[in-house]
Amino acid sequence: MRKIGIIICARYKDCGGGKCFKSFRNREGAFSIYPKDEEIELVGYSTCGGCPGGNVEYVPEEMIKNGADTIHLATGLVVGYPPCPYIADFKEFIEKKYRVKVVVGTHPIPLKYLNVHKSLPHWDKMDMPGLAPDLFKDNEAMMKIYD
Ligand code: SF4
């Protein structure tokens, strides 16, 4: 049993989580790393607390107390405009301090967002495929479903 916590970007704090929960259920996007025969459970869901992400310092502890062994940074950090500049810092910090795995991404990248980001210079500078490799395994048909 894999137990998972999700941290979303606080800019989307009112988000109902529809895309994240759908992809969790269907093992799509970054959740495709879990084989369909492996049970997964969501044990925590919170925001970063707002720029520069103060809640990231504390909220993993609560998730881990509830059994989390893996924390996903939501796809909104990757495809919001501008993308969160702290993705790599958050991943490194949580993995070093809390010794749990951090995966960048939740639901597939919506294709319409990807197309805009690819036309802008920050995308290559941030090396998003390097930061969030599990999101770039999806093909365009899958991304289109999440538009
Ligand atoms: S951009 Fe980053 S630090 Fe700012 S609110 Fe979003 S996730 Fe938090």
Image: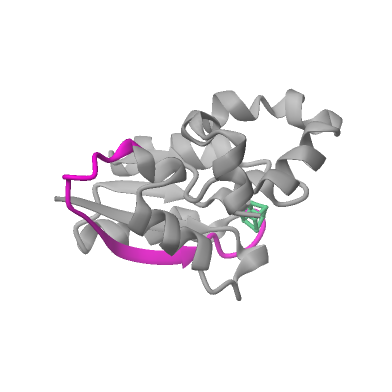
Whether residue 109 is visible to the viewer of this picture, yes or no, is no
The image quadrant of residue 100 is top left
Q: Position of residue 7 (x, y in %)?
A: 47, 57
The image quadrant of residue 21 is bottom left
Drawn side of residue 74 relative to residue 34, left or right = right
Drawn side of residue 61 relative to residue 13, left or right = left
**Measured along the vertical axis of the image, is residue 57 above or below residue 46?**
above
How did the renderer colour the structure?
one colour
Specify whether residue 63 is painted magenta: no
Quarter of the picture containing the C terminus is bottom right
Q: Residue at x 16, y 45 (%)?
A: 37
Q: Position of residue 134 (x, y in %)?
A: 46, 33
Specify whether residue 49 is painted magenta: yes
Drawn side of residue 34 relative to residue 89, left or right = left
**Measured along the vertical axis of the image, is residue 22 above or below residue 16?**
above
Drawn side of residue 77 relative to residue 92, left or right = right
Residue toward you, 69 or 17: 17
The image quadrant of residue 122 is top right
Whether residue 44 is visible to the viewer of this picture, yes or no, is yes
**Measured along the vertical axis of the image, is residue 31 above or below residue 146?**
above
Q: Position of residue 137 (x, y in %)?
A: 49, 29
Q: Residue at x 60, y 44 (%)?
A: 143
Q: Point out the residue furthest to the right here.
A: 120
Q: How many marks?
A: 0
Figure quadrant, ligand 1: bottom right
Q: Point out the residue furthest to the front here.
A: 141
Q: Position of residue 14 (x, y in %)?
A: 60, 76
Q: Which residues are magenta?
A: 33-52
Residue toward you, 26 or 99: 26
**Measured along the vertical axis of the image, is residue 130 above or below residue 6?**
above
Residue toward you, 26 or 141: 141
